[in-house]
Amino acid sequence: MALEGPFWRAIAVFRIASLVYAAALMAQAGGYERPVLGWLVIGVMALWTAVATFAYSARSPRRRPLLAADLAIAMACLLVSPYVEGAAQSVRGTMAVPATWVAGPVLAWAVHGGRRLGAVAAAAVAAADLWVRVRAHESPILINGAVLLFMAGVVVGHVARLAAQAEERLQRATRMEAAQRERDRLARDIHDSVLQVLAMVHRRGRQIGGEAAELGRLAGEQEAALRDLISGRPPDEGATDLRSLLLRHASPQVTVSTPATPPALPAAVAEAAAAAVGAALDNVRAHCGPGARAWVLAEWGDGPLILSVRDDGPGIPDGRLDEAAAGGRLGVARSIRGRVAELGGQVSIVSVPGQGTEVEITFPA
């Protein structure tokens, strides 16, 4: 990942600084008892520092052999320290030949595999360091170096994992933002072309009638489905788009107005609501004449579903609905009130003679 780059560069700087520090200690001690072997160890450390710095920055996916070699070389340089230092090793406070350079592989393991692998590498290096100190007969045995190694491996590994997770989330957010921008662009283009054509075909098909009416109905259904697709709304299993059912009733005499967002309604509720609206419009055509105008208004959201059908007809005289029910004409009583009541809804009818009628259908949220 891209965020690992700064970690590897920081480890490279640490290796170089630790190498300089180890070389300074070697020069100060005069090469200890075996200066040739000691400077050979420093040379190996310098060579591996160059190799590791280049190899870790290459972003190769096969890093396990490199990590294993890194840890093995550090431990070998640490374990050879008693033979280089000789009697000087028993002097209290004398550091091993690699000094702090051995922490480089621990940091590399932590960056690559997190705090667990960092702790594993720290345990291996700490065990080798303790063996060196036991050989020097240090009493009490100093474990400060082992504790620091464990802390470095766990903390750096944890921070590296957090950085990797943050980068992954950032990339995911970037992809989602790009996808949303593309969806918005497509939605604008489709809205300006395809959806308008489907809406026109739907209206014209209803006006012409016959086979064109069926074509218009299919165009209306596809328009509703395409709106759902470009809006990114996940499909709701078992739900029916009430808008497409209501728009089937649109005609030059009937105006249908619905919200832009489709409601997530069970199929039974959507079909019952659309059928009740259709029954109310049938009454308008039967009792108000073919030229009567009607308006269907749908409202939904967090509250109840409200459908209203209003016409500009002569209205319903007082007592007319009761007379129709008594005479066996049950269009309003059963087709509208009964159908809605079965699903927990309510119907209210307001009619003023000479000013038309409004049928309001309400379903609970």
Image (cartoon, rainbow, N blue to C red):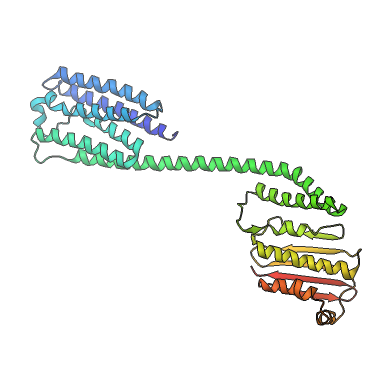
Image position, residue 76 (x, y; %): 20, 27
- Between 305 and 235, which is closer to the camera in this rendering? 235
Horizontally, residue 212 falls left or right of residue 6, namely right
Q: Which residue is found at the position 18% from the left and 23% from the top?
A: 26
Res. 103 image quadrant: top left
Q: Which residue is found at the position 76% from the left and 42% from the top?
A: 193
Image position, residue 174 (x, y; %): 54, 40
Res. 361 image quadrant: bottom right
Q: Looking at the image, is 316 positioned above or below residue 146?
A: below
Count the marks: how many? 0
Q: Which residue is found at the position 79% from the left and 63% from the top?
A: 296
- Between 103 and 334, which is closer to the camera in this rendering? 334
- Between 330 and 197, which is closer to the camera in this rendering? 330
Residue 241 seen in the figure: yes
Quadrant location, the N terminus:
top left
- Between 323 and 194, which is closer to the camera in this rendering? 323
Q: Seen from this angle, which residue lies furthest top? A: 36
Horizontally, residue 338 falls left or right of residue 126, namely right
Q: Which residue is found at the position 71% from the left and 71% from the top?
A: 339
Q: Looking at the image, is 127 positioned above or below residue 229?
A: above
Q: Looking at the image, is 245 positioned above or below residue 212?
A: below
Image position, residue 104 (x, y; %): 29, 31
Res. 244 image quadrant: bottom right
Residue 152 seen in the figure: no
Q: Looking at the image, is 321 positioned above or below residue 363?
A: below
Image position, residue 329 (x, y; %): 82, 76
Quadrant location, the C terminus:
bottom right
